[in-house]
Image (cartoon, rainbow, N blue to C red):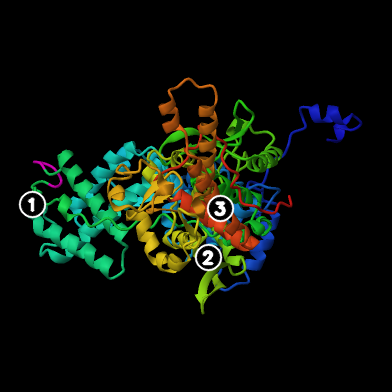
Amino acid sequence: MQALGGIEMSEFLAHPQVVGLAGFGPCLVAACYLDRVGRQRPYCKSHIERLRICREKDGFDEATWRLTDKAICSTREVSLRGLPDRLVVECLYALSSRVDNGFKLRPECLRPLYDRLRAHQVTRFDEVTDPEAAGYSREQVMMIRAARLALARLNTTPETERVKDVWDMSVFGHTGVVPFTAITQKSLREAMKIWVYDDLPRRRNKNAVHHARAIIAAVVMLSESLRLQRPDRGEVPALWGRADIVAYCNRMGHLTATGKQSASRRLAYTRFVRRVLLRFRTLGLAGPGGVLEGMPVDFAIWPEDMPDEPEDAEAGRDLPEAVMRVLCSHLDRLEEMTNTETRVATELLIDTGRRPDEIYTLAWDCLESDPDGSPVLVYDNHKAYRLGRRLPIGGETAEVIRRQQQRVRDRFPATEPARLKLLPRPRTNPEGTKTYKDIAVTHRTWVASLPDLVVPVITTEAGTPVTHLVPFDKTRVFPYAYRHCYAQRHADAGVHPDVLKELMDHRLISTTQGYYRVGAERRREAVDRVTALQFDRHGNRVWRTAQSLLDSEHVRRAIGEVATPYGVCREPSNVAAGGHACPLRFRCLGCEHFSTDVSYLPDLQAHLADLLRSRERLMSAFEADEWARTQAMPSQEESSRVRRLIDRVSSDLDQLTAEDRAQIEQAVALVRRSRTVHLGMPRVGQPLPDVRPSRIHTS
């Protein structure tokens, strides 16, 4: 090389005599990607130092050490060297699946996992059956389970999944799993697989998995009954019969009587089993060659086998006003404990009365306006598969949505608005397209952290009303309860049932009526207050009988009276005829069977106004015979009687204290809503009352 001295470096490197020397070869540690440092030293510099330390340990095996030792960390690289080819492919596929699910890949988490897999000489993920016992960390256990799940779903189809005893519902476009293992009879288990496979395409909402599990749970009860009371444990369908159905019904009754299941669940499970057994026959499973071949015709649940309908327990699940005030005043605490999304979801649940799933899945652009500029919430009714529903909302609720929209836009500026969610998941959601589904859990934690909730209860002690503060059960405060509160608030505000049905997005008004009612206690208290201010046709207060009326008034209002436009009639024959057998032709103010109370004051005032208007109209230039005019003319005595009655009722109201008057007004509103005769139909298009609970905003 000395002959090349004196030339430039570029010329030196380009000279044909200048060639590079061969390397010493790679480090012999399987995971290492560095070169060895010499011919006599087969390891890289770092592994030479590690080897020196490891040789000091008793029983050291250098060959095993070469296969299992870690790679040398360099920048953010993760080494898959030393792993079997199959495991390498599985690791890469698992990583791809995690990226698709929105998880971040961190080298500091991946390196320890692959090093431990290498140390244990694992050849495939299926070999790691119990990662906790093998010493893997919590995060490594999660990654191993996610990898096994992703690999299990690889190349799966509904046709291959339907033969398994535990179905992965992601194959069918849902989430979760559906197990059939609790059905002990093989023929019945196979029949249920066919039934669920046939029923799934007709379940287009997100409750399909829940519905399938409920049906299977009902059939599990039938399977258990067959196993316990048949000598063959119910394995032969041809031997099933009417006695087995009777045994099943008796078992369900026993479980209900002993408190192990509710009456509503007993009814639901019996309905499910009846439907399933009928469907087995229509699917041909009981015919020749079917999995239930030979199943007798009498192995079925007939209408007379169905248990009685339990009393509706849905209505009355709304929260008391005192509880709602406490909840609304602690919304700031909810946001501090959790996040803004949980608070926004809770406010929307309170304000709109939507089902929790309808709020959690709101799109970012869910706020629109009607032609008059009023805000409208656009949501999807997943339960009834009714998409693009529109709900009128108040201005404050719309402002809550606008603030949340701005927060989401600032957080995900690169994502198209059409793909964004109004309540995006805080983690594993790089683009803001995934829904936050843990709100119910954080809501429960928040409610548990609140101070004791108390509600006022009025009792009578020594003839004097006394108010006691009674603790309220916090388990009754859950997201779906706000839907009942929404219905009850609107019902209390006088919204007509037809309008409320549309607001609740129900197909049947009977469903809406199950969400609210005038409870027995509330109605009795209201009737007690109103009856205490009762008057006869002369305007005399019925002091002598008011107390005795209280106990009977509740029954009388239902079966012993008929409503008039401004009071009630208790004439027996007229009541029996539904108000169509009045001998006085509805001259109620002159009848001894007529009475009124403070709740009819608006109707009395309206009746007086009608009398005066009619009198003025007839006295004007109106062409009519004198006898017709005389008979049509309201009498002066009737007008005076109505005016005197109004003055008497108003005078008694004026003598009340402000607190008593407010209580009477609430009782009047409650009684008027519960009457069987509707007085005054609300106009179409009448604006809804503002029933948004008051709350404190600090944001």
Q: Residue at x 53, y 45 (%)?
A: 640
Q: Residue furthest top?
A: 623
Answer with mark 2 or mark 1, whichever residue precedes in sequence. 1
Answer yes or no: is residue 301 visible: no
Question: Residue 283: x and y, percent?
Answer: 18, 39
Which residue corresponds to mark 3? 439
Q: Residue at x 60, y 62 (%)?
A: 660
Which residue corresponds to mark 1? 238
Q: Residue at x 51, y 74 (%)?
A: 460
Viewer-proximal residue among 663 and 7? 663
Main secondary-structure element of the magenta-colored stretch: loop
Q: Quadrant of residue 48?
A: bottom right
| Front of the two marks 1 and 3 | 3
- Is the Cβ of the residue at disc 2 closer than 8 Å to that at disc 1? no
Q: In this rendering, is residue 304 above or below 501?
A: below
Question: Residue 162: x and y, percent?
Answer: 29, 43
Q: Secondary structure at mark 1?
A: helix
Q: Which mark is residue 52?
A: none
Magenta-drawn segment? 287-292
Answer with mark 1 or mark 3, whichever residue precedes in sequence. 1
Question: Residue 102: x and y, percent?
Answer: 57, 43
Residue 288 lies in the magenta stretch: yes
Q: In this rendering, is residue 471 above or below 241?
A: below
Viewer-proximal residue among 133 and 558? 558
| Front of the two marks 2 and 3 | 2
